[in-house]
Amino acid sequence: MQAFEPQTRFLVRGSALLIALLTLWWFVLLGPMLYLLKGAAGVLLPIEDHPSGDWTLRVPVDVTLHRTPRQPLPQQLRSIEFDMPRSDAVTFTFSIPVYWAIMLAAPGVRRKRSPLLLGTAAMAAIELVLFLGFAHITAADAAAQLAGTEYAADKWIYRVGVYLVVSVLPYAAPFVVALWLDRELREEVLSLGRRVEVPVQGGNRR
């Protein structure tokens, strides 16, 4: 027979905790998390907050704009400024409650205080790096268009980069960090689907 019971309990607990913590995040924690993200990212690049909740980011670049009929002399572009909707910034905050749900659903919760704190700090750092990566990728693409040096390969790289930092890494990072920090959880996941032998009549094993 297959030993699925511990994994099933983990999935049930994790699903319930995920719903509860994401609800808490949306109604209570989202505002403070966005504030902290803006403050941390603002140390590295200027961010202006609008009453609507959108952000204006000014990302440093180093691009030469070629001469055009309207612009007879080449110009050096030092920064790109663009607006970021609040809904896009939200993407870089939800990984932390997902990580909490994974860790709290895992066995031995009382022994996980240190991994929980360390993992939360790691997730905050990852979200900050992903946010900055998104800002620089977006600015680089805009600068290439202004300079007239955009190629199909560059556009493909831009799309892949945005896809990774927005649609892949924020979802995968909580699971990777949890498995990295929690050995017991890692063993539990790796044992999923293993067959165990049980005694049956006649001395045979199945």
Image: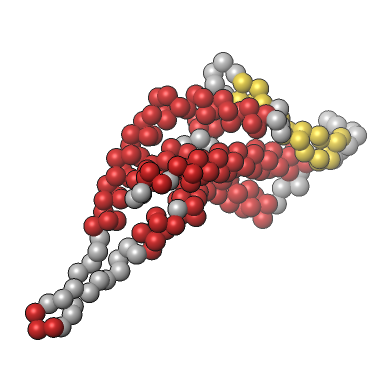
What colouring does the structure picture have?
secondary structure
Q: For the N terminus, which image quadrant?
A: bottom left
Count of residue discs: 0
The quarter holding residue 44 reads top right
Tell me the residue at 73%/39% (across/down). 143
Image location of residue 5, percent across then percent down: 23, 57
Image location of residue 18, percent across then percent down: 35, 40
* Residue 148 visible in this rendered orientation of the protein: yes
Q: Is residue 99 left or right of residue 47?
A: left
- Residue extending farthest front: 111
- Residue extending farthest right: 73
Tell me the residue at 50%/24% (across/down). 31
The relative height of residue 43 versus residue 143 in the rendered view (above or below) is: above
Q: Nearer the viewer, residue 162 or 14?
A: 14
- Residue extending farthest left: 201
Tell me the residue at 76%/35% (across/down). 60
- Residue extending farthest top: 51
